[in-house]
Amino acid sequence: MNFMTPEKTASLLEDIESSEDIKVPTDPLERVIGQEEAVRLARIAASQRRHFLLVGPPGTGKSMIAQALSLHLARPTEEIRVVHNPENPERPLVEVRSIDEVEKELESKGYAEGEYIDPKEAPVSVAERLGYRCSNCGTYSSPKEGFCPKCSRAKVAQVKSTANNPFGDLLGGLMEVTMGQMVGRERVTTTRKRFGKEEVVVFERAGEMIKVLDQQALEKRRELEKESPKKVIVPITRNPFVLATGASEVELLGDVRHDPYGGHPQLGTQPYDRVVAGAIHSAHQGVLFIDELPHLGHLQRFMLTAMQEKRFPIAGRNPQSAGASVRVDNVPCDFIFVGACNIQDLPHILSPLRSRINGGGYEVLVETVMPDTEENRSRLAQFVAQEITMDAKIPHASRDSIMMLIDEARRRAKFVDNRDKSLTLRLRELGGLIRAAGDIAVLEQARLIEPAHIKEALKRARPVEEQIKDRYGSYMGAISSDMSTSEKESSPYQYWNYHVYDDKRGYQ
Ligand SMILES: Nc1ncnc2c1ncn2[C@@H]1O[C@H](COP(=O)(O)OP(=O)(O)O)[C@@H](O)[C@H]1O
Ligand SMILES: [Mg+2]
């Protein structure tokens, strides 16, 4: 009977001065308070890759659990790309590469990139032809500058069209600069002797540096150029948690963007390059989280297919767009589906989707209260520490404040859920109270959040319905007094109240 007396709570938190002394767990699932069953199942869902449905009122940790679950998954090991199909550009091919292959490719690409050198290290003739060195005075400057900053001459004397012009030396630079281009040439090919052998070297302009490609790098580059062009649509480094709440069809399933030139080989963008992944593809090997699941409406059917097949084509979804004729088949989408909704929305979830989750995963009703035990009170203290640490803009809470927040959690369990000897788990709102108290503490430049701050915050943070009740006595009373004076005159609906219908003359 007296296990929840304040003295008992005090003894529990005796050896701390403030929430700063409470350790915040590193395991994201351990930060979820009071939802033991949901957390237990989330761990299984993560290790066994099962779907998951969380049902319950807002602010009880459903999103938090979904995100924590994704952090328990192994990192993605596959990258998804779309490759140009020369035989049929409107049917680009999908390519899946393992993390090892991706890393190897990066390495060889880096090799084909060549080496970067300072323009001063390049042969003088090369530096001049690329536009880094003034052929007149030998000063080095950026190829963006048409005139030598030292001697003011055009840096590259002989430039294409202006070569025969008597003012060519001046116009050369000028013309190139006004055209927004750089002086000199893009690339110079020469030969050099290495280990007694003559070999081809290419020098390329690369901003303020010069890129050097030796024979091996050139061969590598040629090899890469032979490969079909491709686009990475789901990169190897990606967030394993994809939020698709309220997603449109295009956002959920992917799309092929429109191109006014319809993929014309020169003017347009090739179809493969216009392919965009949907949330279901981005969530490959991760978690696809959909809050307020029933709002997905008819899209639930596509979800179901994606979950069954673990592959889903990407096609242009706007029939008016040039993307409509493009389709990529078999794009992987092997995700763990986590859905959330509140109890009254449950009937609006498509039953095959429900049975899919049920048959291949877990459904759990989250708790709204937890028993008021010593252990749970200390978990609530952990919650206070967490919220403050996450917020990072408010000071820690004193021990007395933590106890007051626990009292408030007890009051809310009774007030909102009509449960005795319990603590509320509607923690988003309790978090809001902590932040409001913290803001007051900040304004007062207090070192810690104290009970006075919480009292003040409690006054301010009341739901608007409660405030209305206080001011007007009742909610209905407020509505009628709001409809007073001005609206009676201006509202078109008030017409009927003041004008009487006359059979002969109509309304007046
Ligand atoms: N069970 C819980 N344990 C710890 N913090 C919680 C819990 N429930 C809610 N919170 C806090 O409230 C915030 C909102 O919770 P959220 O997971 O978005 O609720 P829901 O998805 O159920 O509406 C969380 O980011 C967290 O700060
Ligand atoms: Mg949520």
Image: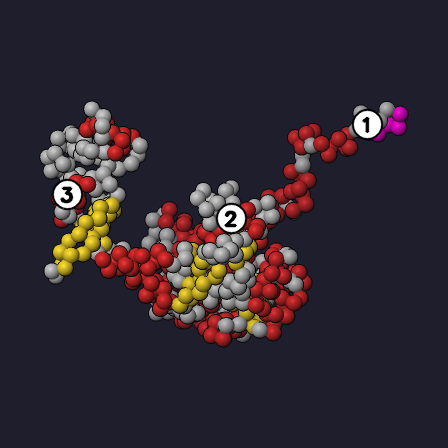
Is residue 416 at least partly visible in the picture?
A: no
Can you tell which mark lies on residue 507? 1
Can you tell which mark lies on residue 125? 3
Could you give the CA–CA distance between mark 2 and mark 3, rounded to whole angstroms? 46 Å
- Residues marked 2 and 3 touching at CB (< 8 Å): no
The location of residue 55, given as percent across then percent down, is: 59, 65
- Please, is residue 315 above or below residue 361 in the view? above
First in sequence, mark 1 or 3: give its number.
3
Horizontal arrangement in the rendering, residue 118 relative to residue 303 (left or right) = left
First in sequence, mark 2 or 3: give its number.
3
Point out the image quarter for the N terminus.
bottom right
Local crowd size for mark 3, using a 10 Å CA cut-off: few (<14), some (14–19), many (≥20):
few
Local crowd size for mark 1, using a 10 Å CA cut-off: few (<14), some (14–19), many (≥20):
few
Q: Which residues are magenta?
A: 500-504
Could you give the CA–CA distance between mark 2 and mark 1, rounded to whole angstroms? 56 Å
Q: Residue at x 50, y 72 (%)?
A: 49
Q: Amino acid at mark 1?
A: Tyr
Q: Amino acid at mark 3?
A: Ser
Point out the image quarter for the C terminus.
top right
The location of residue 350, given as percent across then percent down, is: 65, 63
- The local secondary structure at tag 3 comes to helix
- The local secondary structure at tag 1 comes to loop
Local crowd size for mark 2, using a 10 Å CA cut-off: few (<14), some (14–19), many (≥20):
many
The location of residue 373, given as percent across then percent down, is: 49, 72
Query: Looking at the image, which is closer to me, 496 or 290?
Result: 290
- Quickly name the residue at label 2: 257
The location of residue 474, given as percent across then percent down, is: 65, 47
Q: Residue at x 18, y 33 (%)?
A: 157
